[in-house]
Image (spheres, helix red, strand yellow):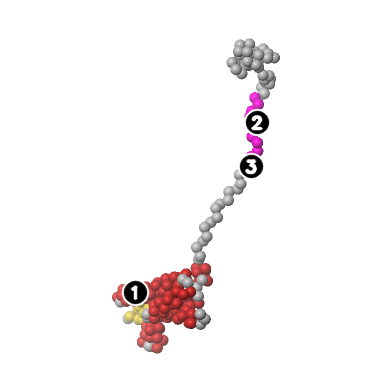
Amino acid sequence: MICTACGKVNIDGSAFCEQCGARLQAQPAVVPGAAAPGPPPAAPGVLPAAFTPPPAAPVAPGASALIASLSMGEKVAGAGAVAGLIGFFLPWRTGAVGAAQVSVSGLDLAKTLGTVYLIPLVSIAAAGIVYTSSKAPAGKKLIFAGFLMLLGAFGGPGDLSGLLFVSSIQSVAGFGMWLSSLGLTAVMAGGLMTIMEFSKRVY
């Protein structure tokens, strides 16, 4: 037996160490070739829970949610603003020059006549007003409707009247000019629809 206090090898069965006198404790016999006992197995712990990703942040409302939040007048004005902007890049004037067919877009025309740039600017401003109006309380929607009527009156009804009733304009007008004129007219009509809706309310 080996003394745990001083390390002296004592005779098996001794109660005390021959060298230091420390009390000896019985030790298990080691069988040659057998592996020494290892540490006891760890108690089974609780398995970690499966990883759960944090909840995703709410997705910003898409175009469908925005359209659903608009009144009918705001939808008409918003569609008109988009149409006015798209029409600016489409052919405004078409005609033959010699043997070639020439098509001039609103952008091409604006390079020589700068005031035509007001068409896309008015369309963008109208789209911004429609978006702001969709978030505004009911009391302020009437103010935004007035701005929409003012913006739509710029070029919309006047150009559309020329396209409908002046044959010389009809003969050279392209699809882009029709679309821009209809778009700005729709912006004005959308503002008017909102004002009419307010006029029907009982306060």
Q: Callout 1: 10 Å neighbours few (<14), some, many (20+)?
A: some
- The residue lying toward the viewer, choosing from 163 and 49, is 49
Residue 40 highlighted magenta (yes or no): yes
Left/right of residue 7 with respect to residue 93 in the rendered view: right
Q: Callout 2: 10 Å neighbours few (<14), some, many (20+)?
A: few
Secondary structure found at label 2? loop
Residue 35: give its label.
none
Q: Residue furthest left?
A: 112
* Label 3 sits on residue: 46
Residue 103 highlighted magenta (yes or no): no
Rendered residue at 48%/82% (across/down): 199
**What's the distance in space between the residues labelled 3 and 2, CA to CA?**
18 Å
Left/right of residue 84 with respect to residue 5 in the rendered view: left
Contact (CB < 8 A) between labels 2 and 1? no
Q: Amino acid at mark 2?
A: Pro
Q: In which quarter of the view is residue 90 placed? A: bottom left
For residue 9, say whether it is visible: no
The residue range painted magenta reads: 36-47
* Label 1 sits on residue: 117
Which of marks 1 and 2 precedes in the sequence? Answer: 2
Q: Quadrant of the N terminus?
A: top right
* Label 2 sits on residue: 40
Nearest to viewer (mark 3 / mark 1): 3
Q: State how many labels appear.
A: 3
Which of marks 1 and 3 precedes in the sequence? Answer: 3
Rendered residue at 37%/85% (across/down): 169
Which percent across, then down, holds residue 51? 58, 48
Q: Amino acid at mark 3?
A: Val
